[in-house]
Image (cartoon, rainbow, N blue to C red):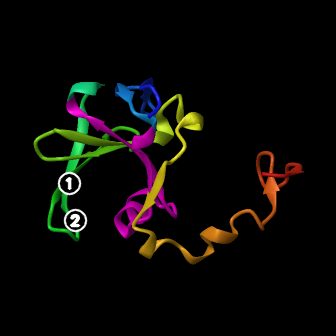
Amino acid sequence: MSDPINVNGNCHCGKIKISAKVEPGMVIACHCTDCQQFSGAPFRPVVIIKKDDIIVEGQVTEYSKIADSGNERIQGFCGTCGCQLYARAPDKSVFNVRTGFLKQHHTLTPAKHIFGQSKVAWIKTIFEGKWHVAGPDSDEMKP
């Protein structure tokens, strides 16, 4: 197992900051339909963090939902800029932190994919389309 790494990040407007110690093997890509709907993306990469390994600074807005499993999951986001921060257990024992806002997101490679049964069909062909360095009129590139 790899050594834990320290991560940190903030919401888009900077009102909420999160820092944590994470295990690289706990990074997952969730393909469930809830993650697709909440994120507006085909999947959502998260890192699972225990409550003793995370510090949240700022006023997080939370929304409670019941998963298909029947478990309650609290969704945390910034009430100002809307940045999605985490899903957590009601007792705050575990946080599934969204990796996209963490400064180290480029190094947090998913160790596993979950809810593959609801993955979008085109995910396996993602590298076949044209890729651009920036916007749609920028130079093409190889991924």
Residue 6 vertical position relative to residue 90 in the rendered view, above or below: above
Dot 1 falls on a residue whose secondary structure is strand
Q: Quadrant of residue 48?
A: top left
Q: Residue furthest front?
A: 1
Question: Which residue occupies 43% across, 75% down?
Answer: 117
Q: Which residues are magenta?
A: 25-51
Instruction: Tell me, yes or no, if residue 83 can be seen here.
Output: no
Residue 125 vertical position relative to residue 143 in the rendered view, above or below: below
Q: CA distance from mark 1 to mark 2?
A: 7 Å
Q: Quadrant of residue 15?
A: top left
Which residue was labeled with disc 1?
Answer: 73
The amino acid type, in three-letter code, at marker 1 is Arg
Q: Nearer the viewer, residue 47 or 135?
A: 47
Q: Mark on residue 88?
A: none
Q: Are marks 1 and 2 in contact (CB under 8 Å)?
A: yes
The amino acid type, in three-letter code, at marker 2 is Ala
- Within 10 Å of disc 2 (Cα), the crowding (few <14, some 14-19, many 20+) is few
- Compare marks 1 and 2 and give the one earlier in the sequence: 2
Q: Mark on residue 67?
A: 2
Question: Which residue occupies 44% across, 27% down?
Answer: 9
Q: Residue furthest right?
A: 139
Query: Is 4 left or right of 58, judged from the image as shown?
Result: right
Q: Nearer the viewer, residue 82 or 98?
A: 98
Indicate the position of residue 138 as horizontal and vertical percent values.
85, 49
Instruction: Tell me, yes or no, if residue 117 can be seen here.
Output: yes
Residue 65 vertical position relative to residue 69 in the rendered view, above or below: above
Indicate the position of residue 33 as horizontal and vertical percent values.
38, 69
Indicate the position of residue 78 as horizontal and vertical percent values.
33, 38
Dot 2 falls on a residue whose secondary structure is loop
Question: Which residue occupies 53% across, 30% down?
Answer: 104
Question: Which residue occupies 44% across, 30% down?
Answer: 13
Residue 23 vertical position relative to residue 118 in the rendered view, above or below: above
